[in-house]
Amino acid sequence: MSSREPSGLGGLTSHLLGIMLVITTPNGPQFVFNYPQTANAPVPRQGKGKLVASASSNLAGNIPRRKWDRETSPFPYSTPSSPALDPMSGVSSRLYRFDSPDTSPPSSAYSSSSSCSTSSDSDDANLSYSSSGGSGVTEDSDDDDGDVDNTLDLELDVLDLLGGSSLNKGGEPNHQARHGHRQSRRRRTQVAGGGLLRSSRSRSHTPGGHPSNGRRTNLSHSPAPGDSAGRVPALTSDLSRSLSLSQSQRRADSPSAYIVSSPRLAPLTTIDNSTIAKNIMPDDITRALRTSNIPMSLGSGSNARDAISRRRSVDNAHSHLSHSHKRHHHHSSRRKSSTDSVVQNHNGDDHDIPVENVDRSRHPASQIDQQSWEKIFGYDVDFLAALLCPRRSMCDTKFEFTVGDLAFLGLPMHERSDGKWNAGAGDRLRKLRRKPAGSASASITMKSITSDSDRFDGEFRYEDDGNEADEEYFDDDMEVDSSTNALERSLLSLTLETSQDPGRDNMKENVANNETTMTVTTVDEEGSNPATNINNMLHAFQNQNANSATAARDSNSEGSNERADISDSFPSDDQVGASSSAEVSSLAGSRTPSVMPSPLLDSSPRPLRKQSAPGDEKSPMIMFHVVFAMNPPELEYNMRIDEMYDYVAAPLAECLRYEQHKSNYVWKQAQMMIRLREHAAMSGTPQEDLFAQTLTKSSLALALAQIFIALSTSSIAKVVINGITRSFQIPIQMHSATLPSILEPVTIPGFYLTTEDYSARLGLEDSQQNGMPFLEHALLLLDEADKIINELQTDPRSPMARFIRSASPTESLLKVAASSELSLSDAETYARHLIYWRRARIIIPVHRRGIYIVVPTAPLSRLRTHSKLFAKAFPSLPSLPRMLEEISSHEPRPYGTLIPSHHLRERYLDALAWLLRLGYLAQLRTFIWLRISKAVKRSVAHDDRLRKVLESSRAEYDDDDYDDDSHDIVLSDTSPNSRRQGDDAAVSLSQLLAEDNQLEDTIILEPDRANVLERKWMDKIVAGQNEAIVELFWKVAKYMNGRVAFEDVPGKEGIERRDLRTLLAIVKEHIIISRHW
Amino acid sequence: MADFGGFPQILSLFYATFHPTEGTKVLYQVPPGSVVKSTDPSAFNTPLFDFESINSYIIPKPQLCNKLLTLRVNNYRIVSHPVHIWGSSYARNSFLFNFCFVFHKDADISAYNPVVRKLSKMFQALEEQNKFLSSAQMSEGLKSIVDQVYEDLNNYCECFIPIDEANSINIKLFPLHHPPPRIKAFHVPISTVQLKAVMDVNWDPTMEKIVEFIDGINSVRKIAELADTDYKLTRKCIQHLMYYGCVIVVDIFQFSNSYACTADISTLANDRHVGEECQSYVASPGANKRNVCDLLELYCSLHNGQTVKEWYIANREHLRGIDIRRFISFGIIKGIIYRVNVFPVLEDINVAATDPLDKRLLRLTKNIKHFDDICTDTQTSRVQSLQSLEKYGEVVLIRA
């Protein structure tokens, strides 16, 4: 005898410890984000490993910046044969294609920048293409010839400028000293940085017309950009490395630079301005304008300064060196005249940081701080990152790695070999295979039903093929563009860049400028931001900044300034809706924390985003991986891991890949988070503050945190990813057909018992095929209508809200739809939505004729609390315990018998719905089996036999050679001998008796697939009844399988309940009725 | 009983080390070709997975050594316990090795975890003692050990391999069960095996005492009383028996109980084996087996608001040849019926008692406990406790 299996109900913990984001860039794996921060608790080590592990981690911890391939790789010694770790060899050939002067298009960066300077005195912001184009070309050839010299020249220029500016402000000597410190520190990190940059990739499809072309060309000629600067000796020693760097750099390049450089966008910028003006609040505009002023004046200064703080960032743009020099060169030439204005325009936003940094860097405390948050689960973050960034062959498939009790789960997403991110054919296959059958799949993206969009579509946004095709088309288009129209594009960018100058000039007088200026300023940021890593330059800029900062605000305390810096310099995602494009503009683009949220691009709707997509493609990110750290109990391991993967990890990864494909979202967010970390590491910001900052700044970080919180509380995560609301949940089984064992009390609130698995019918994808499966049923709201409306953030006047208000447990969806004037499909969609969000469930409409019982899973432990609520809600009714006693103390009977008077009926039905909602009651439903008694069988056998005998005797008379088989049908075990004896009647009698003894009552399990004999039995049951009854019997007989509730049958077959009752009364001898839920 | 044969098959077992110059290498694999290509004629044409792409997880950094690692690769899961031994005698001052078990991805590998751990610990000890692993590139002895572990675990779920006079591999797979749920005083254990037959001298004295009272009638509290054992120890013993599936737990049978059928009643109709089992289980000694349809109908006639006594009176003629207690307990065990418990609820909860027994009674009532719980706790009869409760106000009875 075996006991029932444990039902596995009641377990609500998801065993989720944390969510992490790691990415791989050419610099190697990089840790980006983890939530919660308390996940840093060390994992107990066991046995001998303890010594080893702690020793090595200590060692690692003491080295401030480790090279990735030595200490932090989980792989002891990277064997030279491993291809994934050594991408250089494969890359170099491609590089040459770009870098050889003859194949590469004219270096547009140069052309643009130089023509910038030439046209800088032009007053016309919308400089014509032709003129700038001409100058660009000429400049170009110059550059190609004298690169090294040029670089050095530029360097000098910059220095010149910097010195000038600091002089202008009367730079304080102690600043200089601090920067000296800073500088030396910087050098150290550079050395390590070189190590970090050991691997890189190039992308053959990169548009040739990218502004960085000039840079590239430049690099290929100059021995080593770092050396040319003469200050970063160990940075890049060999040519190919620097080349590859420039390649990767180029990809890291600001997408917003693309926005401007893409020819398509030229007209768009103006269009957008107008649309934006319509879309955003005037306040926003003014605010944005206010903020945007500051950086404009700062220009490259702030960029360079910020570059310091990003010493370890992925886009550690060593190779931008020379380029940025040039940039600065032309900026400087442009700005020299306006240095004063630059200084004055500083609002003193955040310029204490460098100073602050210098201070901190002297204290070992900052190192310790840093260390503390670089341990997760007892492992060094870099180590963990390397561990969780698997090789390509393990990407795009389930990643599951367990260390002791700690499981890391995820779906690492690798960029395609062509550098794109959209799903390949293989991925789709996998997706199909993985799709969980039936139940409401968690990956459904229900667009939040917001006030502006009443219609919502439960679609897989990232599976939207049309969209994707569109994107692909667009990408291809752009590629062509980029290769052929490089020149044109460069010219365009030039135009736009040039156009900033008037704005800049206006800055002095007119702070609140027009939109054009702002767009343009972004461009300016873009252009100059590659400026990095040149200590001197930074130094000088810091000086400048610091001075201006001190000038601007002396009253502010250091600490608050520092925070203000970050919050100002990173566009906050809080004003979402715009978030995606905000990133497009300032965040990803400028690896500076450019101090402008760039409201134009912010609020610009989709078209712009789409336009910018191809430009955004240039991310150096090769792979990203959202890792779920879990500690499932050993026995539930597979189940827990699988559900987390199927419902959350995989859909989330695919969603992120879609966004990455579309607008480079993941990379931008990752970049921002990394930068914040580094900023914090530099300035010694406490870990909590860093977390808070990251969560407020990055929509992805926030989303991951929200997902973590939601999953740990078994609720639904509703997150905004790149401006689109998505939801993730591990579905809870709120109902069961099987009663949980007496040993495992149910802990899920609202748990109910039913054999009806609506969730299977809810499978959203095939609603068309199934028709509308539950329109006959009613929707039981699990909360007050107004509260639900509020929670779903639906406009109270929307059809959805109307539907929620008119939903009633007593009325079928059909009626509700009619009364709220909604189409059936809308009603159904809303119903699905509510069910998905666990705000409603499907029930058979409550009716006074229904029979209800108090279920064994009733939450009686909360009876006291519920009594009070019940008394408040239904003051005219008996107390809750009384009600339950009334319902349960008799043989189950229709609920109507409880209702004392007609006018209380409504109240009682409401109370019934209330009790159902809380899981006190279940409806007893009727399930029927057909029982075939001996008598029926015998009688059928008799008939058969009689007929057979008649037939066979007739056959004997008609034809002498009759068939043996005809006998065997009836008398299955007739021995041939007995038949030979000839006396048919005698034999059959004895046979019949034998058969009679064997006859047994049986149940027809599948009446709808009854065989001939069973059909005869069923015929016999209604033999002698009138035709209507017989017809009705055959209509409903197929439901007599013990699985279909007869309460549903009248609705299904369109028959009267009364008739059905009559029929059941007639055949009651032949049916077994069981009543359960 | 637990299914001792239900262990997943080891699809492959391989031994990998870190070679000072060649990196991570698979030195031996069974079956041949399952992990890396092999020249063996019987080898697999293609390995189960691409070893190159995962070798960094097979021989990981020291941080991850001496821990149980599992890694999923395609349709397989690799369970291993890499070992890192420091020593100046080694080429890089350290020796890294790993014995890895490959399973199908959906296999429940919980039973293997201790085995993997133990095996690697053992090889670590052997290596530390006499350089068993590192002395030769790949000794025949080691090959045969790996072969035998693979074969024996797959075929017999255990293996015993003497290695030298001091060491031997001695492993056996044990199923991992869920921890037993907490049982209560009013639960009634029913044994599923002949406990007396499996008992031996090593059993716990409490266990020895209580075994004879586990008869499917006595509650845990009663057993403790009858056997004159400590209640808590008794409960522990019974939980222990539950863990191994030797007993299952039902509630107390009384003729005043109510039962009703659950949705699983259909298994009795649909599953012929359950039907046959029921027929033979519920039949009174010497009586003929009853037809399944009759039994089904009888189960269906149980419902809320009706005691077994009432039910018996109503169906007396149909119940001929049926042991009612066994009829009910079969239904409970199979989950085709459930016990309808009665919860006394005092309308007024602001009452206080002075009598200690009443105090306890009131406390239980306020926490909404059913009569079984209350009666075993206060050790009074149901009627008694109801009467004492009624002294404190109106009592509402909820049946659920």
Image (spheres, coloured by chain):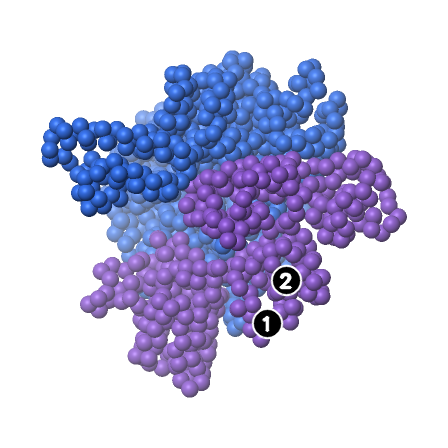
Amino acid type assigned to the residue bearing label 2 in the image: Phe
Q: Nearer the viewer, residue A238 or B39?
A: B39
Disc 2 crowd rating (10 Å Cα; few below 14, some 14-19, many 20+) is: some
Is residue B98 in view? no
**Amino acid type, residue under disc 1 in the picture:** Trp
Tell me the residue at 30%/63% (across/down): B35
Mark 1 lies on a secondary structure that is loop
Across and down, in percent, residue A225 comes to 39, 53
**Residue at 52 percent of width and 73 percent of height:** A48
Q: Which chain is purple?
A: B
- Residue B203's tag is 1
Mark 2 secondary-structure assignment: loop
Give how far across and how far down residue A1039 sits, in percent: 42, 29
Residue wearing tag 2: B213
Picture quadrant of residue A164: top right
Residue at 54% in and 71% down: A47
From the image, state the color of chain A. blue
Image point (76%, 53%), residue name: B379
Could you tell me which chain the residue with mark 2 belongs to?
Answer: B
Q: How many neighbours does mark 1 have within 10 angstroms: few (below 14), some (14-19), or many (20 or more)?
A: few
Q: CA distance from mark 1 to mark 2?
A: 16 Å
Query: Hey, which residue is sitting farthest right in the picture?
Result: B354
Marks counted in the figure total 2
Instruction: Say if A142 sits above or below A233 in the image.
Output: above
To which quarter of the image does residue B212 belong?
bottom right
